[in-house]
């Protein structure tokens, strides 16, 4: 006898949750990255709208402004993972996004009173607010995505990164030239965040069971595929810290994500400087060339998504093999193109643009390759894993420019830049090798709800609330 497998409606609340996550990431990245255009507009009013104040900030002061967001961002990643397990994803994401919008709206006021120091201060606060959110996104995907659709729904939601990159670059410039000038960049970003909060409040739910709009068929499909029992959503599962920190697949993922962040930060932040110094080409003066790598990244993210769906649907590759294959492309192709860029001269500027665009575009496969791997390893603790990994990975963009500053003493010196690109290439290669040897997309034993009780009873006694223990066990 055979029975038809219920897969729920073709479009359901799980897709609404994915759309909300996509829009959230887009809004966050608009607020995070519009600072690059804002700083230019504030320090060169003639290029945008001269009716608003202009500031005479040094390169050092502007670099502080550009990096200040990450000073706060790295400190709340782990906290976000803990809070969403404790109080639910819906509340933490709502208040984190709302706070980010408030700080965005207050940015012009802080600049007026505190100058560049005030700008840094409000950016730190925005980073603290946004740092709570990405661990919540992974936990939300784990609770709403049936395993068969997890790769697709996760990848679609993360394309908000590329969408936010492109929107921040294009729309911020248009707003700065409009009648509302550079303050309007912050106001529009805040308005977008507040609008998202409204829709999130209406339609989001911590899980399928709590959703007011989900149908019975979809609810059964999601919960049965995730193998949740009736009491699952009512319990707080203790976190197996020892098992997490001694897990080879998790440590391999941590190494791979840090190496990928180093390579990507080199591609996005340092290559434009190299092209200006060595190739005598100002990428920032050409909006099309500046946006081209991000457009390629956005386009390639959907190419990877469709390819992954086809391969998984036809059972041509296991999920582990798929992640390792795509991750190898996302890491090793930029590894080669980075070295190639270092050998180009001023007569080969077009090739430099092509190689940079290929590097950034192909690297978008890292989302399917490693970024979503936290959910594979542990759906129950995905937010904790993401909090740890994102904390470590976001220290890298702070360290990378310092290392480049130590190596490159003269921006026109090609040999010094070749060392920078070689380091990034080696890390790309090494990070993927570690993931190939030790990574997996198989759920780990320590993800089990009763793991601590079975494997680490002495830790379980400390982690679990006292009133959940039998009196004889106390």
Image (spheres, helix red, strand yellow):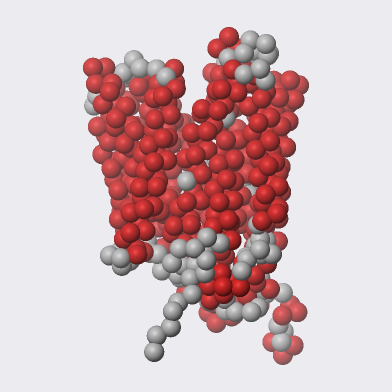
Hey, which quadrant is residue 181 in on the image? top right
Horizontal side of residue 441 vs 385, given as left or right: left
At x 39%, y 41%, the residue is 299
Q: Where is residue 90 in the image (x, y as percent from the top left)?
A: 67, 57
Hey, which quadrant is residue 381 in on the image? bottom right
Please state which of residues 352 and 245 is positioned toward the viewer in this rendering.
352
Horizontal side of residue 337 vs 282, given as left or right: left
Residue 104 sits above or below residue 45 on the image: below
Considering the image in quadrants, where does the C terminus appear? bottom right
Please state which of residues 358 and 342 is positioned toward the viewer in this rendering.
358
At x 51%, y 27%, the residue is 170
Hey, which quadrant is residue 281 in on the image? top left
Residue 350 sits above or below residue 293 on the image: above
Please state which of residues 294 and 376 is positioned toward the viewer in this rendering.
294
Residue 381 sits above or below residue 176 on the image: below
Number of callouts: 0
Q: Where is residue 197 in the image (x, y as percent from the top left)?
A: 69, 47
Considering the image in quadrants, where does the N terminus appear? bottom left
Q: Can residue 57 be seen in this view?
A: no
Residue 59 sits above or below residue 450 on the image: above
Horizontal side of residue 144 vs 103, given as left or right: left
Q: Position of residue 245 (x, y in %)?
A: 50, 63
At x 37%, y 28%, the residue is 271
Horizontal side of residue 309 vs 465, given as left or right: left
Q: Where is residue 304 in the image (x, y as percent from the top left)?
A: 36, 50
């Amino acid at each position: 006898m055979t029975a038809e497998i219920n897969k729920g409606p073709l479009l359901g609340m799980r897709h609404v949750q994915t759309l909300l996550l996509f829009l959230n990431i887009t809004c966050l990245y608009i607020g995070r990255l519009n600072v690059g255009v804002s700083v230019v507009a504030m320090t060169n009013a003639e290029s945008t709208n001269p009716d608003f104040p202009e500031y005479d900030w040094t390169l050092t002061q502007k670099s502080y402004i550009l990096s200040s967001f990450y000073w706060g961002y790295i400190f709340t990643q782990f906290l976000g993972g803990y809070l969403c397990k404790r109080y639910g994803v819906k509340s933490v994401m709502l208040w984190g996004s709302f706070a980010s919008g408030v700080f965005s709206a207050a940015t012009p006021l802080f600049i007026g009173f505190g100058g560049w120091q005030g700008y840094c201060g409000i950016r730190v606060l925005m980073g603290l607010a946004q740092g709570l959110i990405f661990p919540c996104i992974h936990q939300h995907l784990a609770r709403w995505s049936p395993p068969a659709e997890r790769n697709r729904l996760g990848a679609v939601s993360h394309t908000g990164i590329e969408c936010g990159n492109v929107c921040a670059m294009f729309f911020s410039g248009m707003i700065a030239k409009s009648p509302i000038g550079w303050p309007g960049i912050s106001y529009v970003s805040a308005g977008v965040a507040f609008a998202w909060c409204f829709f999130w409040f209406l339609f989001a739910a911590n899980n399928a069971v709590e959703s007011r709009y989900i149908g019975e068929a979809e609810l059964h499909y999601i919960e049965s595929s995730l193998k949740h029992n009736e009491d699952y959503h009512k319990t707080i599962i203790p976190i197996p810290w020892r098992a997490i920190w001694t897990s080879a697949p998790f440590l391999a993922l941590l190494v791979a994500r840090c190496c990928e962040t180093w390579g990507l930060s080199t591609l996005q932040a340092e290559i434009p400087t190299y092209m200006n110094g060595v190739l005598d080409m100002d990428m920032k003066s050409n909006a099309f060339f500046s946006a081209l790598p991000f457009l390629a990244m956005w386009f390639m993210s959907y190419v990877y998504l469709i390819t992954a769906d086809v391969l998984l649907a036809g059972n041509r590759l296991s999920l582990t093999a798929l992640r390792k294959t795509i991750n190898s492309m996302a890491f090793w192709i930029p590894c080669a193109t980075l070295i190639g860029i270092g050998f180009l001269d001023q007569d080969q500027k077009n090739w430099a643009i092509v190689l940079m665009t290929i590097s950034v575009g192909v690297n978008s496969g890292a989302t399917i390759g490693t970024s979503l791997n936290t959910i594979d390893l542990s759906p129950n603790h995905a937010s904790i894993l993401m909090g740890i990994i994102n904390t470590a990975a976001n220290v890298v963009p702070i360290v990378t420019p310092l290392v480049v500053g130590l190596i490159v003493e003269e921006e026109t010196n090609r040999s010094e830049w070749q060392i920078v690109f070689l380091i990034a290439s080696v890390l790309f290669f090494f990070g993927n090798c570690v993931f190939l040897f030790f990574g997996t997309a198989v759920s780990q034993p320590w993800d089990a709800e009763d793991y601590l009780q079975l494997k680490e009873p002495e830790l379980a006694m400390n982690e679990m609330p006292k009133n959940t223990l039998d009196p004889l066990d106390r």
